[in-house]
Image (cartoon, rainbow, N blue to C red):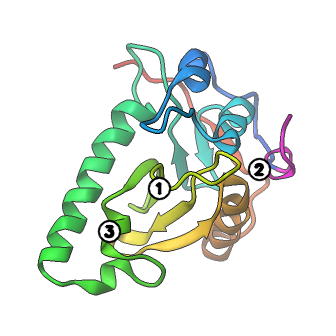
């Protein structure tokens, strides 16, 4: 079942999905033994791989031999994010966790999407909600923490609103991108 937030997404063309690893989407397990949040799985199934709101690249799990996957690119961006925040904490750059976060939170966040202007969308897989979702955070310029919602369904309208305020309204929300081989 597609949630209202997903069904409201306007796709420019058919979603790009030939490289998505749907077995991993349904079978991957986090440290708590649970899988990907339902809102993320619904988004990947509905929108595939593309540029969301003219800006965001939400990484799906991909089959071997393909780039731009959650476990490849997302993992590398998570390492960079955490290293930056460890440095920021050592330097007492407390503004990096404002307005909504704290240092211990930053250490648990994982990048699952990246914007073309250097912002990160993160989830906290250490704080799964009772309905199996991960809280969603945004780090603008990798030097702030903004809570966007309890799941991707709540975050999407805020992401659209912010994109519209910067770039103006767009005729579509998701622009499918080609699958890229490594």
Left/right placement of residue 30 relative to residue 48 reads left
Q: Which residue is mark 3?
A: 104
Circle nearer the viewer, 3 or 1: 3
Q: Which residue is mark 1?
A: 122
Left/right placement of residue 21 relative to residue 48 reads left
Count of all numbered marks drawn on residues in the image? 3
Give the residue displayed 28% in from the left and 85% down from the top.
94
- CA distance for labels 3 and 2: 37 Å
Give percent across and percent down for residue 163: 63, 67
Q: Which residue is mark 2?
A: 172
Circle nearer the viewer, 2 or 1: 1
Left/right placement of residue 175 relative to residue 33 reads right
Comparing 10 with 143, the one in front is 143
Q: Earlier in the sequence, mark 2 or mark 1?
A: 1
Which segment is the magenta one?
Answer: 1-8
- CA distance for labels 2 and 1: 24 Å
Give percent across and percent down for residue 15: 70, 29
Asked which secondary structure carries label 1, the reply is strand
Mark 1 burial class by Cα count in 10 Å: few <14, some 14-19, many 20+: many
Relative to 18, does residue 67 appear above or below in the rendering? below
């Amino acid at each position: 079942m597609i949630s209202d937030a997903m069904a409201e997404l306007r796709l420019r063309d058919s979603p790009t999905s030939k490289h998505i690893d749907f077995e991993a989407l349904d079978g991957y397990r986090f440290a708590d033994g649970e899988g990907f949040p339902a809102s993320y799985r619904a988004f990947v199934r509905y929108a595939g791989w593309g540029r969301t709101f003219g800006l965001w690249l939400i990484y799906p799990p991909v089959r071997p031999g393909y780039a731009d996957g959650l476990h490849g690119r997302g993992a590398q961006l998570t390492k960079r994010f955490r290293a930056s925040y460890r440095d920021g904490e050592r330097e007492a750059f407390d503004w990096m966790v404002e307005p909504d976060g704290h240092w211990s939170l930053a250490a648990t966040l994982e990048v699952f999407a990246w914007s073309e202007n250097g912002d990160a969308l993160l989830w906290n897989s250490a704080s799964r909600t009772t309905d199996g979702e991960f809280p969603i955070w945004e780090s603008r310029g990798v030097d702030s923490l903004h809570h966007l919602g309890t799941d991707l369904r709540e975050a999407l309208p805020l992401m659209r609103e912010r994109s519209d305020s910067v770039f103006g309204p767009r005729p579509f929300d998701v622009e499918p991108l080609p699958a890229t081989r490594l």
